[in-house]
Amino acid sequence: MMKLVRALALTAAVCVTAQSGPAAKPSPTKRAPRKRVSKMEASGARAFVYKTVGDRELKLYVLSPEGHAPADKRPAIVFYHGGGWVGGAPGQFAEHGKYLAKRGMVTVHVQYRLLDRKSKAPPTACINDAKSGMRWVRAHAEELGIDPDRIAAGGGSAGGHLAACVGLLPGVDDPNDDLSVSAKAAALVLFNPVYNNGPGKAGWGHARCGEAYKTYSPAHAITKEAPPALVFLGTNDKLIPVATAEAFRDGMKTLGCRSELVLFEGQGHGFFNYGKGGGKAYRKTVRAMDEFFVSLGYLAGSPTMPEEP
């Protein structure tokens, strides 16, 4: 009897299978789209939208000292990346930012519109955004735990140009900004900056600026109110002649402004970047930057960056 029941059950199963056709293949599991994490966020920075242009959000990234509280009023530096105004990303100064955060400063790394071939942004967009970023930081200084009177600007190459603009250049503001908030940096740390946009060998970027170069050229906007500046440059830089950097330094000093120029013998453009050339120039520039901030009262003690790895 049991054999008969088993036989009938097997027959029924076969019939059901035959009627239902071939078994459907299981649908592949859809993976959730990966969230893109920027280099700055991977470094522990908090991201904030400081400006919206059309449907695009522009962000800046904030690294704070460990245990930092909003009630603190720490000095800060706003970094602008290089890339010829057409490339680059805020993560260029991530290691500089992490170091300074450990030393007690808040560091901010700004994303700005690029002037690449796909961009429809006007030529002034980068400067507009650089100033908007600084204004946002100063306007939110209380919640970020920043002293609004001690916010420096720093940058390399084209980013050095933007940092210098924030420290020296009048106007070229985004009309949508709250212009009652100052965009002026209290100090400048510039890594092979493109801060002279005039004609001839002394300048760079004149082809972009044309005869309006004085509107965009920080070297042509020095006044006695200029903030103290520290400039790093390689003597073999093909874009920024040593004579240009010396003229900037001397022009600042003539007006009674503090300006320091540190030359690196035989080094080319971008020599200061983290991981380049074994990191020797990176360490030296970071130590000099640290000492500069100590002299301004932004930091205390000796640099913790080792001279050798």
Image (cartoon, grey):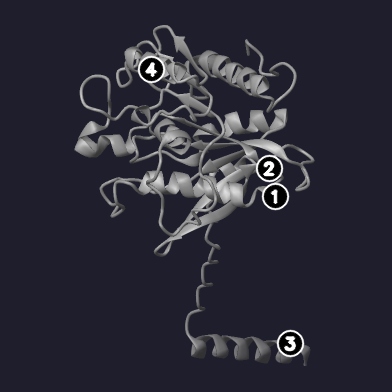
**Are there few (<14), some (14-19), or many (20+) residues within 10 Å of tag 2?**
many
**SS under mark 4:** helix
Q: Label 4 is placed on what type of residue?
A: Ala
* Picture layout, residue 5 above or below residue 206: below
Instruction: Look at mark 1 in the image and give the residue it sits on.
Output: 142
| Mark 4 and mark 3: Cα distance apart in space | 99 Å
Quarter of the picture holding the C terminus: top right
Q: CA distance from mark 2 to mark 4?
A: 31 Å
Give me the disc on residue 245. Answer: 4
> 266 or 291, which is in the foreground?
291
Answer with the quarter of the image where residue 175 lies: bottom left
Q: Amino acid at mark 1?
A: Glu
Residue 3 bears which disc, if any?
3
Between discs 3 and 1, the one toward the N terminus: 3
Amino acid under disc 3: Lys
197 or 273: nearer the viewer: 197
Residue 37 visible? The answer is: no
Measure the alpha-carbon separation of dots 3 and 1.
84 Å
Distance from Cα at disc 2 to Cα at disc 1: 6 Å
Name which residue lies at 61% across and 20% down. 292
Instruction: Give residue 153's mark.
Output: none
Give the Cα separation between the discs numbered 2 and 3.
Answer: 85 Å
Camera-side residue: 254 or 215? Answer: 254
Tag 1's secondary structure? helix
Mark 2 or mark 3: which comes first in sequence?
3
The residue where tag 2 is placed is 146
